[in-house]
Image (tube, helix red, strand yellow):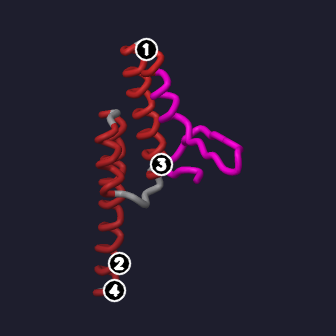
C-alpha cells in the first residue's frame, strides 16, 4: 500500500510540474516579451521549450534593434544594426561573417 501511495504522489508531482511548465510557457508566449522568455528560461532551462524560448528572445531582440535603426533612419544606425546582426572574424588577411543565431561568437 505504501509503495502504491508513493507512486501516486510521485506521478502527481510530475504532472503538476509539467502543467506548471506548460502554464509558464503559455504565459511567456502570451506576453511575447524578452523578459517573459528569460523568466521562463530561468525556471525551466532544460525544458522541451528552452531552445524555442532562446530563439524567440533572439527574434524579439532583433525586432527591437531593427525598430531602433528604422526610427533613427541614419547610415550609422543601420550600420550598428548590421554589426549586431552578424558575427565577423578576421584571421591571416581573411574575413568571414555569419548570421548571428546564438549568443556565441565565431572567434
- Label placed on residue 7: 2
Residue at image mark 1: 74
Give yes or no for residue 105 being in the magenta stretch: yes
Task: Please report the bounds of the magenta region as a residue range.
Answer: 78-107
Please say if the residues under marks 4 and 2 sit with CB atoms less than 8 Å apart: yes
In the displayed structure, 2 sits above or below 18; it is below
Q: Which of marks 1 and 3 is in front?
A: 1
Q: Quadrant of the N terminus?
A: bottom left
**Observer able to see residue 21:** yes
Residue at image mark 4: 3
- Quarter holding residue 87: top right
Image position of 76 (left or right of 42): right
Per the model, the C-alpha gap separating discs 1 and 4 is 69 Å
- Residue 88 pos. (x, y %): 59, 42
Give yes or no for residue 89 being in the magenta stretch: yes
Dot 2: few (<14), some (14–19), or many (≥20) neighbours within 10 Å? few
Which is nearer the N-term, disc 1 or disc 3? 1
Which is nearer the N-term, disc 3 or disc 4? 4
Please say if the residues under marks 3 and 4 sit with CB atoms less than 8 Å apart: no
Q: How many marks?
A: 4
In the displayed structure, 87 sits above or below 6; it is above
- Nearer-the-camera pick, 22 or 12: 22
Q: Which of marks 2 and 1 is in front?
A: 1
- Nearer-the-camera pick, 10 or 26: 26
Per the model, the C-alpha gap separating discs 2 and 3 is 41 Å
State the SS at label 1. loop
Q: Which residue is drawn at 48% across and 45% down?
A: 52
Residue at image mark 3: 103
- Residue 77 pos. (x, y %): 43, 21
Q: Nearer the viewer, mark 3 or mark 4?
A: 3
State the SS at label 2. helix
Amino acid at each position: 500500500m505504501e509503495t502504491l501511495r508513493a507512486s501516486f504522489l510521485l506521478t502527481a508531482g510530475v504532472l503538476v510540474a509539467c502543467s506548471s511548465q506548460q502554464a509558464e510557457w503559455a504565459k511567456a508566449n502570451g506576453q511575447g516579451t524578452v523578459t517573459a522568455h528569460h523568466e521562463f528560461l530561468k525556471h525551466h532551462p532544460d525544458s522541451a521549450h528552452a531552445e524555442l524560448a532562446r530563439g524567440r528572445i533572439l527574434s524579439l531582440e532583433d525586432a527591437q534593434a531593427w525598430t531602433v535603426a528604422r526610427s533613427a533612419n541614419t547610415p550609422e544606425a543601420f550600420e550598428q544594426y548590421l554589426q549586431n546582426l552578424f558575427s565577423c572574424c578576421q584571421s591571416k588577411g581573411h574575413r568571414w561573417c555569419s548570421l548571428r543565431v546564438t549568443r556565441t561568437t565565431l572567434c
